[in-house]
């Protein structure tokens, strides 16, 4: 069965706070958006947005948050904009992504017909049309420069807004917005980058921990080939249900064990205690428990126990990340159509056993059978939507940020980091020390890591320089 790995990996951070528009301090509203921007006869649908004008001053910018793949809006008050807006005199606004949350252009039962207008052109067109509406309906904002923001898939979209609609979006900050590892296997040499980067995270923090994980996973991989005492394994890994065969063991490995090692690094946020849905710094807990563990199952369970907070692993039910707050079907569709991100290869030399992972490599068949479409290649996408290496290097007012404990960083446009330039308007890539997935997008009042807090300050200075201001 095909499972959208990218959906699991790219939504967990955005669903962590579990906020909806109605719970935000500032209420949401709706805009009548065109169903199809490429049709002169298109009807409209109600698209949700949130606007905060509390700190706006004449001449200030609009900080625009591009919605992504979650079912609920993340309140703007929970994000770094709460800190930036007073300094910049900025208006802050977010637009919900079409087909997610309550912004649905179609509810037709046939999925191919329902999602026919879920194209990148329409997603970007929604944001362009909404900004035009916002400026027209509010004379204060008529001449305001717009800086797009987004995290993960939304970060990629925010970069696409700058690259494809520079007349509307003056700049973009793309938090963990991947530009690599798109496309089917034969055209995607970066599909092994995820596990290479993840392996290096564990090795960098503790060579001993990395060695113990490597040995434990090699032992478990042997069980997948030859079988083992399933009841003992279920007890050792605290599984809710005893596996019945080696196929079950492979499913547990791919959907639970690998995801646990991913989540405990990628979402290891330095947040203050008490925030709902978040455990502070789980990576540190995994490292300490692994050092104390003895035997393969105890080593592996060190990661599982942290992710599931001691509860049994429901491997036959929900996946390790849980899809609460995410909407899988429309995201699978857009993965097939224009965002075919892939982490389906574990190359040699990492702490993980070498191999191809079925849940991503089955995408081509899934896309063909479910939506009757062929997955585009990276070259086709990057050429059409202007994110080739040449395009990225030539861009201005475009900043990508990636955390050092986020495996999505393996999909970063590192060519921007490798060049030396004093031009602050040139496109750039910022490394966030000890940063988890999009952690630098959070409200700094929640955060504790000095490197992440400093990165947020650096990003604010980029915006100031783009706008040509120092103070308001």
Image (cartoon, rainbow, N blue to C red):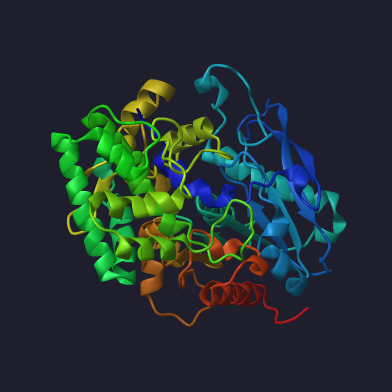
Front residue of 444 and 299: 299
Q: Is residue 239 left or right of residue 351?
A: right
- Residue found at the very far top of the displayed protein: 109
The residue that appears at 53% across and 56% down in the rendered structure is 159
319 over 457 or under it: above or below: above
Q: Position of residue 260 (x, y in %)?
A: 39, 49
Horizontal arrangement in the rendering, residue 470 relative to residue 115 (left or right): right
Residue at x 73% of width, y 54% of height? 93
Residue located at (82% from left, 59% from top):
53
The N terminus sits in image quarter: top left
Which residue is the extreme one toward the left? 226
Q: Quadrant of residue 293?
A: bottom left
Q: Nearer the viewer, residue 249 or 33?
A: 249
The picture places residue 48, in percent across and down from the top left corner, at 73, 40
Q: Nearer the viewer, residue 96 or 221?
A: 221
Relative to residue 112, is residue 324 depicted above or below?
below
- Image coordinates of residue 153 in percent, x first then y, are 50, 49
Instruction: Kindly indicate the quadrant of the structure image that contains residue 166.
Output: bottom right
Q: Is residue 54 visible?
A: yes
**Rendered location of residue 278, percent (x, y):** 57, 55
Residue at 19% across / 56% down in the picture?
215
């Amino acid at each position: 069965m095909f499972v959208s790995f990218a959906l699991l990996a790219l939504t967990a951070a955005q669903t962590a706070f579990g906020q909806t528009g109605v719970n935000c301090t500032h209420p949401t509203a709706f805009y009548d958006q065109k169903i199809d921007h490429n049709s002169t006869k298109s009807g409209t649908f109600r698209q949700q947005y949130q606007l905060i004008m509390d700190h706006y001053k004449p001449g200030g910018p609009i900080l625009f948050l591009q919605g992504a793949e979650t079912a609920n809006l993340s309140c703007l008050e929970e994000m770094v904009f709460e800190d930036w807006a007073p300094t910049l005199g900025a208006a802050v606004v977010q637009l919900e992504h079409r087909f997610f949350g309550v912004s649905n252009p179609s509810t037709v039962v046939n999925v191919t017909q329902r999602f026919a207008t879920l194209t990148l052109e329409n997603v970007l067109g929604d944001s362009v049309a909404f900004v035009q509406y916002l400026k027209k309906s509010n004379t204060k904002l008529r001449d305001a420069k717009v800086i797009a923001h987004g995290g993960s898939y939304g970060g990629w979209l925010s970069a696409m807004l700058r690259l494809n609609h520079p007349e509307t979006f003056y700049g973009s900050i793309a938090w963990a917005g991947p530009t690599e590892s798109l496309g089917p296997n034969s055209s995607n040499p970066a599909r092994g980058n995820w596990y290479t980067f993840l392996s290096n995270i564990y090795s960098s923090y503790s060579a001993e921990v990395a060695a113990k994980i490597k040995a434990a996973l090699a032992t478990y991989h042997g069980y997948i080939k030859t079988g083992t005492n399933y009841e003992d394994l279920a007890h050792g890994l605290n599984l809710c249900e005893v596996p019945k065969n080696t196929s079950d063991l492979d499913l547990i490995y791919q959907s639970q064990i690998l995801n646990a090692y991913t989540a405990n690094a990628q979402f290891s946020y330095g947040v203050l205690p008490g925030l709902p849905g978040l455990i502070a710094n789980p990576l540190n807990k995994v490292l300490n428990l692994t050092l104390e563990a003895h035997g393969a199952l105890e080593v592996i369970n060190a990661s599982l126990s942290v992710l599931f907070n001691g509860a049994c692993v429901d491997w036959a039910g929900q996946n390790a990340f849980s899809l609460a707050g995410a909407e899988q079907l429309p995201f699978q569709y857009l993965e097939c159509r224009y965002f075919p991100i892939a982490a389906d290869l574990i190359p040699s030399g990492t702490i993980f056993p070498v191999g191809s992972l079925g849940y991503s490599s089955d995408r081509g068949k899934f896309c063909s059978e479910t939506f009757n479409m062929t997955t585009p290649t990276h070259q086709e996408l990057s050429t059409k939507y202007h994110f080739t290496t040449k395009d990225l290097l030539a861009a201005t007012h475009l900043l990508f940020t990636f955390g050092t404990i986020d495996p999505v960083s393996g999909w970063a446009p590192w060519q921007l980091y490798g060049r030396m330039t004093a031009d602050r308007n040139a496109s750039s890539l910022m490394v966030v020390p000890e940063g988890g997935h999009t952690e630098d997008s959070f409200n700094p009042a929640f955060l504790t890591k000095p490197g992440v807090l400093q990165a947020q300050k650096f990003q604010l200075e980029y915006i100031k320089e783009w706008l040509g201001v120092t103070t308001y």
